[in-house]
Amino acid sequence: MDPMKVMLVDDEERFLSTTRKLLEKKGIPVVTAAGGAEALEMLRVENVHVVILDVKMPGMDGIATLREIKRRFPLIEVIMLTGHGTIESAVEGLKSGATDYLTKPADVDELIEKAEDAFEKRKRLEDKIRVAQARKSMQSAQQILEETKES
Amino acid sequence: MNDEHRYRSLRRLVLACMILVPAVPFIAALVIGYSHFTSALETGTIASMKRIVADHRHMLETFLDERRADLELIAASYTFEELAWPRSIQEVFRDLQTGSNAFVDLGVFNEAGVHMAYFGPYQLTGKVYREAAWFQEVMKRGWYVSDIFLGYRNVPHFVIAVVGEDESGRWVLRATVDSNLFNDLVKKVRIGRTGEAYIVNRNGLFQTERRSGGELMRSDPGMAEHVRRHPGIRTFIDKDPQGVEHLYATTWLEEKDWMLVVRQEKADAFKALRTTVYLVVLILLAGGTGIVLTAFVLTSRIVRRMERMDVEKDRLGEQLIRATRLAELGEMSAGFAHEINNPLQIIKSEQALIDTILDELRERGDLPASPDLEELRDSMEQISLQIERCSKITQAILKFGRESEPVTKDIDLLSFIPEVASMVEKKASVHGITLEEELEPNLPRIHGDPAQLQQVLLNLFNNAVDAVIARHGALGGIILVGARSRGDGQVAVTVQDNGCGISPDDLDKVFSPFFTTKPVGKGTGLGLSVCYGIVNSMGGTMEVDSEPGKGTTFTIILPAMSAPAGKAGTTVRDDGQGCEALSAA
């Protein structure tokens, strides 16, 4: 499987660029988006595993973006980035399928830790899917054999 | 003060109303009743006097008529010749006396006025009366009744004379009548203590004795102006010569110039009235006193109650203003803190980047170790620390401004408070502080978020500990936590300390956000305002009472759960410095 790829979504340009540099220094590939719509657009072409999503953004806000991501790309793990004043929306995010949340000002190490946890989760999920799919294909092969036998 | 003036005029108004409203009908009833009673009494008294006068006049007239009729019968039955003989007149007189023993003598006169025959105690035979007034009048009118005179044996008498007629011509029959009989008749009239009756002639001379003084044939000087013939019955009030007012009823006999007088002292006649006056005055005084006293008592009660209500109203108003202000501040500062978190995040990222780059440079050997580098690293650490500090502040602010859904349940303060107290016990004992509890048994439960209430109590405890340490160091501090029912559906929890106290200037501000007396970096100044917000959200209020150098008492007043008792109050008293210790803790 590919190494973890992270997408940062925030309306603060400087936060995006600095954090990107920090993550890249740790060897984590990063893409950034300045808003919800842009993020969704990019997710179509980029194979992102974990999205760090700011809750409070102009235009399409974090929660709406989260729901849309989860609808279109159910396997992508989302970590909400929130100010304390929006803890409630973080909880709402968790209910809507976010994996975890971070409170501002967040430590980069903490951010990476949570992203990796999410990535692990994603990997486990993908493994499960793979096993299930393999089992299913095996099952169907058996079924075909049995059906042929009967006929 | 203005308030005092207002209450004074209010008191006056209420008092006036409370006295006047019952007093007006009360006095009106007394006055109307009294005047009706007076006029009824007067009418009744006068009516009875009139009746007595009328009755007695009738009796007197009947008496006179009867005596005249006696004589007229004799005049008609006998001739002059028959009567002129002394023996026969004696017989006739005897007959007459059997009819009425009032007759004293009897005489016969011829037309020329010569006394022809007489029977009686005097020797009058032969006297000539031709020129006498009574003789002339009887010859003219046919009959005559004299006024009273004192005759034989000094006994009052009057004479009746009638004219007889036969073939020998006109003659006169005259009899003397003892007036004692009708004197008694008149004298026996008695009304009340002083009521009496008497007769005066047209000259105002007494014809009967008057019980209250008045001999026969004398005149009553006070009566002179009233002795004038008038028809029917006349009533009037006049003073007698002694100046005593009397009620009079007078009437004139029809065929004789005698006036029958019935009189009574006014004071006597209206004695009942005086009793009534006393009674009325008594009722007026007693009732009036009662009304005034009641009015005073009720008024002061009403005004006191209004004062209390006004004070309560003002207090509530102040609380409302403070709560509103705190809510606005909370909202504002929450937005503020949230906005600060964004730049803070960037600073933190930048700082992390700088650190990373510095580390890389050092690893690559591009940055040899030097004092400058050390200083740089120290500076970076400081930045990191200050970011942490900012972050804590914004966290606290957000907590204060946040309106999260509390998880409420019934809280039994009797077990809850010791639980919380045990959390600070160790810290307290380290500083030599005695932690005392004073919990009222059977305290009603309260309803709220235990975690929040714990936060409030811990904050107050911590403040108390700080305040006590500030004053006593490590010896002699006392923190007393109490809980009692206030009896008005509320419970009061108090936290009381003997610490350094809060200055009056600061006392107003302790619940305001960012107010702290602690050294920079030690407190955010949000602890107590957060407490206030929490207690408010539980439907309660917080109060503080402090004296610098003596200690501080914080009181939390919370609504009690069950019906009968009131709010519950928990007081945490501390010395009064840093109420914001909570947020910093």
Image (cartoon, coloured by chain):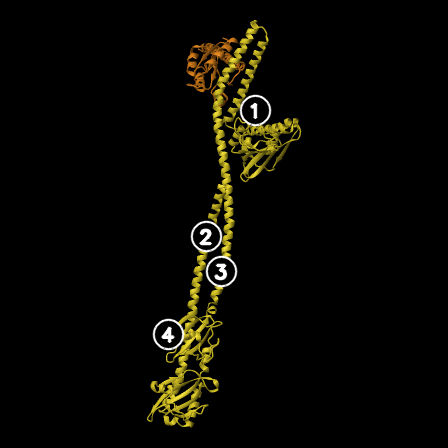
Chain colours: A orange, B yellow
Q: Identify residue for label 1.
A: B523
* Residue located at (53% from left, 24% from top): B396
Q: CA distance from mark 2 to mark 3?
A: 18 Å
Q: Identify residue for label 2.
A: B20
Is residue A29 at all visible to an observer of this figure? yes
Residue type indicated by callout 3: Val
Query: Residue B232 shows which numbered tag?
Result: 4
Q: CA distance from mark 4 to mark 2?
A: 50 Å
Against A140, residue B196 (above or below) is below
Q: Nearer the viewer, residue B68 or A96?
A: B68
Q: Give the letter of the chain under mark 1.
A: B
Which secondary structure, mark 4?
loop
- State the quadrant of the C terminus of chain B: top right
Local crowd at mark 3 within 10 Å, few (<14), some, or many (≥20)? few
Which secondary structure, mark 1?
loop
Residue B95 rendering spot, x and y as whole percentages? 43, 89
Local crowd at mark 4 within 10 Å, few (<14), some, or many (≥20)? few
Q: CA distance from mark 4 to mark 1?
A: 114 Å
**Is the Cβ of the residue at disc 2 closer than 8 Å to that at disc 3?**
no
Splitting the image into 4 quarters, where does residue B235 fall? bottom left
Residue A140 rendering spot, x and y as whole percentages? 46, 11
